[in-house]
Amino acid sequence: MFRFPPLDCHAHIAPDVTAAQVRTLNGAQVFAMTRTLEEFDAAQANPQQGLIWGVGVHPGVPTALTQWSRERFVAAADQAVLIGEVGLDRRGDQSTQRDVFRSILRDAPAALISVHSTGRAREVVDLVEEHPHPGIVLHWFTGTPADAQRAAAAGCFFSINAAMTDEQMTVLPLDRVLPETDFPSSRSRTQARTPGDTAALEKTVVRLTRQPPLEVRRRWYQNLAALTERAAVQDKLPSELRQLVATAQEH
């Protein structure tokens, strides 16, 4: 069976990361989130093999909200295949967060969107139902089973990590899950030493699904293939990831 490289659909990497540092990630394909539009601008100027930079407006970062500009977001999103990290957070000005997230959902082009929902999962699902988008991935989703069911019915995918409980993972549909580390957050719980280090998560999913490790990783790439096709972004993917997605569809 083809051995796919590690896949990490939500991590944080410094925008000035060097090629030498990226080489330590063992060929991982990493969706690298930014927290502000300024951080995305800096990251976009530093392309690195294996990193897919996201256009971020993190709801829990006050400067991300004060720097918010619909015009800047639209211009940045038009260049990118990934939007993230965006969403709602239990901290901060909730009215502003809702306004910004609603605008992002309305204005987002064809893209993948990694969505934060800490403490506000139900409200995130409400807004996703109100403004559906085919590329939404709910990152580290800890809503109720009913919230997860609504999100799945709205077409959402979910990125999971080793800090989540068995119960939080098993309520999510297997064909909608993707791996993440959320590096460097909660490293003691995710056991991720670097972005792309999903070894602990793979062991958990092997135990829960009784599938062999290579099959677990292949399924994740198949799920990503389904998401990118649904969101109509396959042609926007970097060439290496586009080939991996195509290979997953063939197997």
Image (cartoon, rainbow, N blue to C red):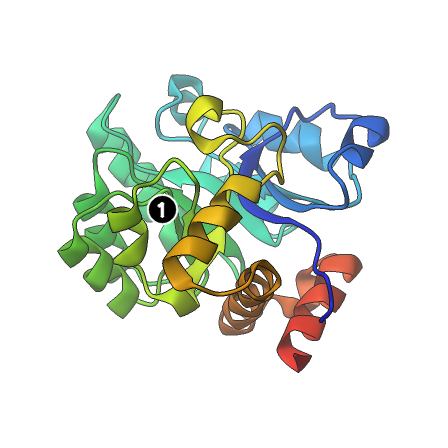
Amino acid type at mark 1 = Ser
Identity of the residue drawn at 29% across and 65% down? 152
Identity of the residue drawn at 69% across and 73% down? 246
Q: Quadrant of residue 111?
A: bottom right
Q: In the drawing, does residue 119 fall left or right of residue 101?
A: left
**Residue at far top of view:** 63
Q: Looking at the figure, which quarter contains the C terminus? A: bottom right
Q: Is residue 75 visible from the viewing direction of this image?
A: yes
**Residue at far right of view:** 20
Q: In the drawing, does residue 148 fall left or right of residue 169?
A: left
**Residue at far bottom of view:** 250
Q: Position of residue 150 (x, y in %)?
A: 20, 62
Q: Considering only vertical position in the picture, is 97 above or below 115? A: above
Q: Position of residue 229 (x, y in %)?
A: 55, 73
Q: Considering only vertical position in the picture, is 195 above or below 245? A: above
Identity of the residue drawn at 25% across and 22% down? 91
Camera-nearest residue between 202 and 212: 212
Q: Looking at the figure, which quarter contains the N terminus? A: bottom right
Secondary structure type for disc 1: helix
Q: Position of residue 208 (x, y in %)?
A: 37, 57
Identity of the residue drawn at 52% across and 49% down? 202
Task: Tell me the crowding category of disc 1: few under 14, some 14 to 19, or many 20 or more residues within 10 angstroms, Cα based.
Answer: some
In this figure, which residue is indicated by the disc labeled 1?
103
Q: Is residue 46 visible from the viewing direction of this image?
A: no
